[in-house]
Amino acid sequence: MHPAAKHNRIGIEEKILGANDREAANNRRLFAAAEVYVIDLMGSPGAGKTALLEATIPLLASQMRIGVVEGDMATSRDAERIAALGVPVVQITTEPLGGACHLEAAMVGRALDRLGLDELDLIFVENVGNLVCPAEFDLGQNARAVVLSVADGEDKPLKYPLAFREADLVLLNKMDLLPHLSVDMAALRENLKQVNGQTRRIELSAVGGTGVGAWTSWVRQAVERFCMVKV
Amino acid sequence: MHPAAKHNRIGIEEKILGANDREAANNRRLFAAAEVYVIDLMGSPGAGKTALLEATIPLLASQMRIGVVEGDMATSRDAERIAALGVPVVQITTEPLGGACHLEAAMVGRALDRLGLDELDLIFVENVGNLVCPAEFDLGQNARAVVLSVADGEDKPLKYPLAFREADLVLLNKMDLLPHLSVDMAALRENLKQVNGQTRRIELSAVGGTGVGAWTSWVRQAVERFCMVKV
């Protein structure tokens, strides 16, 4: 970019993010008033976010009332997978909205009407599959979790730092593939620590089940602290 | 978004894309004048784009002069991996440029001065790892290839259609992991065909070597047709 174009662009981005922050604050007030805990689940396409929800929801659904917001560029495939679990779900597809590569607070805000906030204790927002952009957009969530497939390599926290910096929790998924990969797990853990020394890390396999209990415990405790529901 | 905000945003995006198209046309003229063939390599973080270049460059370097532009949010790790192969490489990190989630034509244009266009027959541009945004930004390339890890699942072409629609070639990578995955390859091929019936598909393993020959043949023929270099 020419310096002028760059300056102009950054100005535009600040305006978009400012408008988003106001919508996020509004969502946050609605969530607090309804005593709903909201987790924004971020990660690349194929990191295993939907598979993780499929493993998680059956373990928690008897203890709390769960709803899901699904973000994708196109199709309602993920919403169909979640609906099969018997919990309320709203699909947001961004392609008709200009093809956004992330969810924005106002999109989530509009989905809440259809989800029925007062009937829920916990909402998972599965963001658009993208390790870069979603982290820039506050949705009014209580916590952010990044799902990273260990098949994607140990250097990802260093090369795509923003999402990891923003994360309260990092879920290293597809641990069942580890024997077949050349990924350096010690380096991955170290790279993660280097980018964000505060974030909690859980290593798991959404399809195999290993580590899923540690994640559901984290969720249960977070909801308990926030909502004071009996779980 | 409110309708007004949405309208405003789409207007802004059109302006940014319009400015990018002018820079891309300029790159395209420079590439044509220097008789350099340029391939924009897109895909999620961890799809295996750099590993593919590590497998590709040694097979082609005796037949043509290759340069690489590496795009990442942060670090020069990929450029270091490519430099180890003995070919000229320029790293673009987008975080100091406002954190862009994709390469833009002007960024590539500035990298060309450092790469020495007249000394090259082929340039690989490894875009920022992101299956959504890079496809929106023309870089002036001759061809676009999308790298998709088969570990990411069969539904990705349907859920992230733009990159696949834009692709001249789709490389299904990490085929060596297939015995350990539950991915439905027939559905993946069918989904790809549904989104883009014209694109060529090559199934390969950058680390295992299977299928890499089909890809290097495709590259060699494309360069031959374009540059009339003797390969």
Image (spheres, coloured by chain):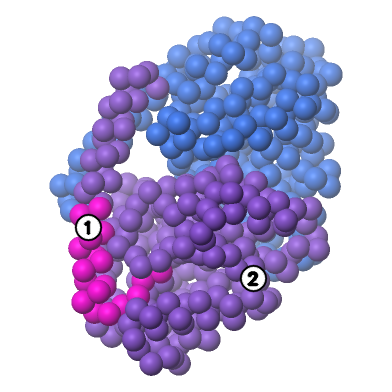
Chain colours: A blue, B purple
Categorize mark 2 by other alpha carbons within 10 Å: few (<14), some (14-19), many (20+): many
Task: Note whether residue A90 is visible.
Answer: yes
| Label 2 close to label 1 by CB (< 8 Å) | no
Type of the residue with mark 2: Leu
Type of the residue with mark 1: Glu
The x, y position of residue B95, in whole percent, is 37, 51
Extreme residue in the front direction: B197
Callout 1: SS? helix
The x, y position of residue B139, in whole percent, is 32, 60
The C terminus of chain B - image quarter: bottom left
The x, y position of residue A15, in whole percent, is 28, 29
Q: Residue at x 38, y 49 (%)?
A: B136
The residue stretch that appears in magenta: B21-39
Alpha-carbon distance for marks 2 and 1? 33 Å
Quarter of the image for residue A48 reads top right
Please give left or right for residue A36 compared with residue A2 in the image. Answer: right
Quarter of the image for residue A155 reads bottom right
Please give left or right for residue A96 compared with residue B103 in the image. Answer: right
For mark 1, what is the residue?
B23
Q: Residue at x 77, y 66 (%)?
A: A180
For mark 2, what is the residue?
B204
| Chain ID at mark 2 | B
Q: Residue at x 74, y 20 (%)?
A: A87
Please name whichever residue, A133 or B181, is drawn nearer the observer in this view of the structure.
B181
